[in-house]
Image (cartoon, helix red, strand yellow):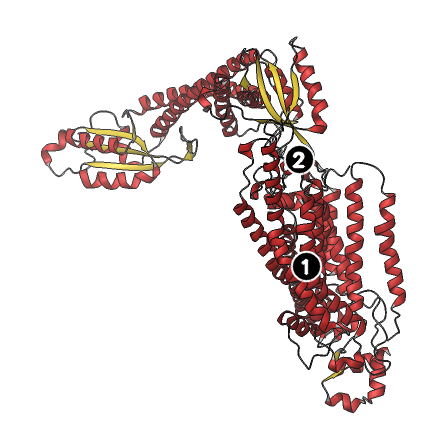
Amino acid sequence: MGSMFRSEEVALVQLFLPTAAAYACVSQLGELGLVEFRDLNASVSAFQRRFVVDVRRCEELEKTFAFLQEEVRQAGLTLPLPEGALPAPLPRDLLHIQEETDRLEQELRDVRGNRQALRAQLHQLQLHSAVLGQGHGPSLAASHTDGPLERTPLLQSPGGPHQDLRVNFVAGAVEPHKAAALERLLWRACHGFLIASFRDVEQQLEGPVTGEPATWVTFLISYWGEQIGQKIRKITDCFHCHVFPFVEQEEARRAALQQLQQQSQELQEVLGETEHFLSQVLARVQRLLPPWQVQIRKMKAVYLALNQCSVSTTHKCLIAEAWCATRDLPTLQQALQGSSSEAGVSAVVHRIPCRDMPPTLIRTNRFTASFQGIVDAYGVGRYQEVNPAPYTIITFPFLFAVMFGDVGHGLLMFLFALAMVLAENRPAVKTAQNEIWRTFFEGRYLLLLMGLFSVYTGFIYNECFSCATAVFPSGWSVAAMANQSGWSDAFLAQQPLLSLDPNVTGVFLGPYPFGIDPVWSLAVNHLSFLNSFKMKMSVILGVTHMTFGVVLGVFNHMHFGQWHRLLLETLPELVFLLGLFGYLVFLVAYKWLRVTAASAASAPSILIHFINMFLFSSSPTNRPLFSGQEVVQPTLVVLALAMVPVLLLGTPLFLHREHRRCHSRRRQQPDKDTAGLLDLPDTSLASQGSDEEKAGCPGDQAEAEFVLSEVFMHQAIHTIEFCLGCISNTASYLRLWALSLAHAQLSQVLWAMVMRAGLSLGGEMGVAAVVLVPVFAAFAVMTVAILLVMEGLSAFLHALRLHWVEFQNKFYSGTGYKLSPFTFAVEGE
Amino acid sequence: MTAHSFALPVIIFTTFWGLIGIAGPWFVPKGPNRGVTITMLVATAVCCYLFWLIAILAQLNPLFGPQLKNETIWYVHFLWE
């Protein structure tokens, strides 16, 4: 089908919804999720739209739902997820839901209030019984005696005449953190006239407000003197103590205690009943609330969508404008017919022409979705322009793998992604909430391909956890070199480093058939070889990638019928790019094929040739690569420079000529009806790629705004961007070399410092085996953390940048918007 | 240590990736994903073949050889060859 190569065709449709069936139709459309409504009442404020009352009712209901949900949550219960299909309720059902909800809310509030009051009462009773029940020591033993206390004064009061005063008591309870302060204040204010005793209550009592257990402190103050009594009462009031009446006689106290205990038992029974009723109400809420929430959300969405429709002049039907994929139009017809026939009327839908750019719709499956996602993260494509995503499926993992190449690391990444892919249908995996896990899980197919390609590039780089494997025997022979150069043991002992010379016969026996020769991993100068190899590889891959991007632009021009751009833009661009950097690739390949070791001492330097090419000079010490090079190079440079004015002036002048031709033609036939053709309107920045620029004459004078200066400006920017971009983007691809070098070095350091050090520990085998366990653990942890996660993220980012900037700026504009259909489905469900 | 030819790997790998990239698309079953699958096959073949080709061409005519430590030379010479 090829529907992923560019956006699907999207049409603007007009819906005529009879008022009786409008709600049902829109509800059905929401279930299907086919169309995106356009707001026809944009100039009307939210408070003046037609269905604002209904929307407000839904919102009030949602507020009540939020309260109920909070209550359920506070009680420690959870709401189950709603099951089954729940269509939006009819307006008459709304009343029923509203009544039920209000009743539940009222009941909950009442029950909670009651429970609160009962708990407070219970708390008081418990405090009182604690106060009465506490014994306060021998200092108050005198309280056991009946009769007036004047007979046996407790204390030698300072003044004799006061001996006839009665001892009074103040008993109460105070919060523990205030007890010390209370005691101090009492002593300061009235010492000498009272005895205060503080005791902790043995059991913890639950506070009525917070429900948290706290240990209260009971106190018993015996004092004499009326003024002291008043002082004490003021102090206890100030500390918010609970003061209870204290009877001196033991019997009375015991009777009071019994009564209190009876009362508190009855109260606890009532409290139990209240809790039971509360849990029943909460259970009802748990059962009824989730489906209501879904239904009211759908209803509100339907009314918000209906608010976007305009009312026809006869007030009999609503008119809606919506974007719909052309492929879905029959389904849309059917759906409308179905839902409106129940009301006995029929809804009509027909297509209307549109001037604006339609939204972009690209259907993806679970494999292609992540690749489309990374393209859309840069920008959603314009309507019907070429979509880079299908090519990105392969080139992105490939460029990642070039920067990450290692068999071992690639295999680990592949296995991790494979595990995620095989487990993707498990419900536990699908409903996980951890953000970081979800990010990795959404990109599991991306990781799968990245790992697979990394294994391949790892084999080519000949790196497996930084060690080379000799799958085939090496193509370099040390024995041949040693025998022919007379390397005896004594000679070797003197020279720490010796080179193998490819000029000596028998030393170099041919290129390694798959990848880099393993001898290089033993060499001290391996970076000299690898750097040269990787830099040239980066340039070749970069020029190829960019050329591919320019070629993709051809499909855009063809689709939109802008044939002039093929000749005036694509051709000059290709000549410029290939004439300069394609030639560089040619030089690299030529040198690889033709310059042998025999002439290694005088081998030409590509870099110097390339620099001299631009400077139109030559270096005498640098011999030419091929005959005729001194003619070919200046020709190419002149050709490329000649393409610049073509690129700069070609398209604007052509469009200007077209515009003038249409103008003169229209002036000759003023009354000719040119309707039916789309315009050739402003060819400025915005619509450069739009399908309005089909060949044709302007139908309306006002629309044919062809501002030459704007077109020139745009084209100048494009030219400069392309030409300078060619150079800078080619250099930018060198990051492929840089990152692969960094990865190789990091992994080599980790191997040499950790694993090899562990493996080369001397000692008995048993000891070495035990020591290897933590050594391997350290190696594994650092491999995963540094090489897989950090380097992986880094290579991912750079591969992304190469795609977004260097590849896509050759053909992609990314200034469209997605078709977001009106649907009841919530993100993430 | 052993002689490697250049022509044989070129023939083998060109055939291999050619089969995948040129012959493979003919065998992709018709369906909604045919276009994407063909694109994937061709892109994989081009990328992987190009990468392998660069690696072998870079080693075809080496201008300098590996510089080895004397211990390595002794080990490889006397224990391997």
Q: What amino acid is at disc 1?
A: Leu
Q: Nearer the viewer, residue B81 or A67?
A: B81
In the rendered image, the residue lying farthest to the top is: A344
**Mark 1 Cα shell of 10 Å, populated few (<14), some (14-19), many (≥20):** many
Task: Point out the image quarter for the C terminus of chain A.
Answer: top right
Q: Which residue in the protein does label 2 denote? A: A361
For residue A541, side relative to residue A698 (left or right): right
Task: Point out the image quarter for the N terminus of chain A.
Answer: top right
The residue depicted at 59 percent of the width and 37 percent of the height is A664
Quadrant of residue A509 within the rendered picture: bottom right
Question: Could you tell me which secondary element the residue under label 1 belongs to?
Answer: helix
Looking at the image, tell me whether mark 2 or mark 1 is earlier in sequence order: 2
Q: Nearer the viewer, residue A88 or A357?
A: A357
Q: Chain of mark 2?
A: A
Q: What amino acid is at disc 2?
A: Leu
- Numbered disc total: 2
Q: Nearer the viewer, mark 2 or mark 1?
A: 1
Residue A577 got which mark? Answer: 1
Question: Could you tell me which secondary element the residue under label 2 belongs to?
Answer: loop
The residue depicted at 34 percent of the width and 28 percent of the height is A132
Q: CA–CA distance between discs 2 and 1?
A: 33 Å
Quadrant of residue A610 within the rendered picture: bottom right
The residue depicted at 73 percent of the width and 61 percent of the height is A406
- Answer above or below: position of A639 versus A229: below
Q: Is residue A508 in view from this perspective?
A: yes
- Answer above or below: position of A717 versus A340: below
Q: Chain of mark 1?
A: A
